[in-house]
Image (spheres, helix red, strand yellow):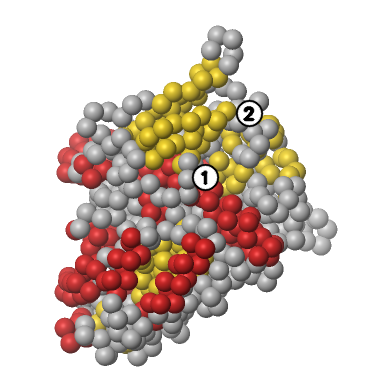
Amino acid sequence: MKYTNCLLLSISLAAMAIFITVDAKSQNSPIHWQKIANGVWKTEVGKPEKNNLLTIAGVGPKISAINKMSIAKFPLEENEIKVEVYDGKTYLRFPLNQNEKIFGLGLNFKTVEQRGRILRLHEDHYDGIDNGRSHAPIPFYVSSKGYGIFINSARYIDIWVGTGVRAESKNAPKARDRNTDPKWSASPYSDNVEILVPTEGVELYVFGGPSTLDAVSRFNLYQGGGSLPPKWGLGFWHRTPTLFNDSLLLNEVDGFTKHQFPLTVIGLEPGWQSKAYPCTYEWDSKRFPDPKGLINQLKDKGIYTNLWINPYISPESNLIKALQPYTASHTVWSGYVPDYSMKQTNTIIGNHLKKNLLDIGVSGFKMDENDGFDFWLWPDVAKFPSGMPAEIMRQTYGMMMQKLNTKLYRAENKRTYGLVRGTNAGATSFPFVIYNDYYSHRDFITALINSSFIGTLWTPEVRSSGSAEDWLRRMQTVCFSPIAMLNAWADGTKPWTFPEVEKEVAEVANLRMQLIPYLYTCFADYAFYGRPPFRAMNLVDGFTSNNEIKDQYMVGDNLLIAPLFTGETSRKVSLPAGKWYDFYTGKLAGEAEIITVAPGLAHIPVFVRNGGIVPMAVNNKVAEGKFDLVIRYYGNKETSYQLYDDDGKTFDYEKGVFSWRNIVVKKYPQGKLFGTISNAEKNKPDNIGNVTWEFKTN
């Protein structure tokens, strides 16, 4: 692609370096920030490790896309950034203004704003506390002032976010008498972020704005841009119980047809393998005597197949004879732990997956248990044949599995979309969505919001419910997430498990299918421009709130989603600047204000900004060619929208085989609105058939 120009660009920009002073016993000369792209600066402190997050991911930056963004200046006071290396560790300090908000620092489930918190970023299964142990312990934070900081280390990193008060602080808090002063606080104001990296050096990056969304977008583009899933990946997914066989699976599919419910991906859980925990990666011949025939039957119905795996290989697997020399000193569940940092490991496992799974039509994988807990994974005293430390292996193991998987499908020019339990910085372009076994609906939405700050994707999957109301509310939110999925591996639930809300569940699932043209364009924006498809309100231009917003979010630029949870009949919604309209009725909902909505059980509240265009498919099938389009328009002002189009399944778009169709809404002289859509360019994809317009606002 265009990555070959990166080195020349770095050299040509070297003269534009910004110098900062260094408070460091081990440094005898100033450290400088090298401008490596528009709004991106890099420096090396001390002796950084060769194995860092970006080198392990191995994905090149999209320098050309970054350089097309608005011009950004270095966003911090250089002399307020302090670095010190001693005792084998690197100490970093970045300034904070008094009213500055900090977001990011991993996939958090209960908090969005991170100021005032202490974290150790450590790959792990989430255990109910936002303490840095996370499925995605990504060492990147972004500020409400419109800049981002990335610490490119694959170690466990300690971070004090506005909690440590320096004696020499220019803005030190006033000492107060607890006995008499009601303003005394146990957590006084701090004007810095302090970071401890347990190595003798580290690579640092600063990403400029001017907006917070710009800083996040630059960070995403520097990791290769976001993933663009195949169109089928944006449909409805259903995962079957663990020990299903081929006949039970086909009966399950028939149930979807009988209930007129959309189904795009069927997921097989551990029982597809001859043995699991540890795994063979081989079909169970009794439950699935003809896997290729089964997969073809499903494909004929427009259904793709996704298989569950975890990393730990059974001694009875045919892989072990060749693989064992490239495994760790410790086992997990008596299974061998492959060293994915080695070429030999990737070749052996990659060849096996290709021959036995990809070549018969498997479309993707769910990669489980590459995250934690401590007593399940290898200990940090484990040794790997590559020599990579166990700590770094843990921080990046899920990412390395994603890397191999992505490479296998790229080699066949087929896009995939899957699930993973662990990831880190560098993996933004890998087509995987994080999930876990934690099951708080409200916290799921907070995690979805947080994922937008750190270059990853998260799904609030549905598994079970204690009531019809909870079932419907969960189904409504998952249909406005990166993967709309019901995971029935444990108890065999169906979308129609609660008959009293079957109609409403089907309606939101069908709406999800109809929204695929809009969602696909959101993901194209992620891939080409780095903008998260699902994003926090704090990334929205014109949004201001003194409160921490943990329960509403945007899908793309135009849709605001405000979920309700079990027991709620109404809720407050904070609307950004401009007019906002009800998605279902087109009526004005409000303008830059906090409103209260009571939509009833049938609908999840959705709002569209003034001038918002929402392209929708006519039916609930994933289009694999020409499809008819309904273009909804909300509001009363002239506007435009770029609709993305390609073949929906290959990587040919990276060679320029794609279209951006310009949708424009204007007013006639008498004030009436009308819309147009441009033709596809010559020799570019042209998959849009008949177009119908719906002007929703009266």
From the image, state whether disc 2 or disc 1 is nearer to you: 2
Visible in this render: residue 416?
yes
- Image coordinates for residue 242, horizontal then vertical, percent: 45, 79
The residue under the point 80% across, 55% down is 181
Estimate how packed mark 1 is, as few (under 14), some (14 to 19) or many (20 or more) residues with alpha carbons within 10 Å: many
Please tell me the numbered disc located at residue 520: none
Q: Is residue 26 above or below residue 573?
A: below
Q: Label 1 belongs to which residue? A: 555
The residue under the point 52% across, 45% down is 555
Judging from the image, what secondary structure is the residue with disc 2 in? loop
User: As drawn, is 572 to the left or to the right of 489?
Assistant: right
Q: Quadrant of residue 326?
A: bottom left
9 and 673: which one is in front?
A: 673
- Image coordinates for residue 147, horizontal then vertical, percent: 45, 43
Estimate how packed mark 2 is, as few (under 14), some (14 to 19) or many (20 or more) residues with alpha carbons within 10 Å: some
Q: What amino acid is found at the position of numbered circle 2 in the picture?
A: Thr
In the displayed orientation, state which residue is furthest to the front.
258
Q: Is residue 54 above or below residue 488?
A: above
User: As drawn, is 609 to the left or to the right of 618?
Assistant: right
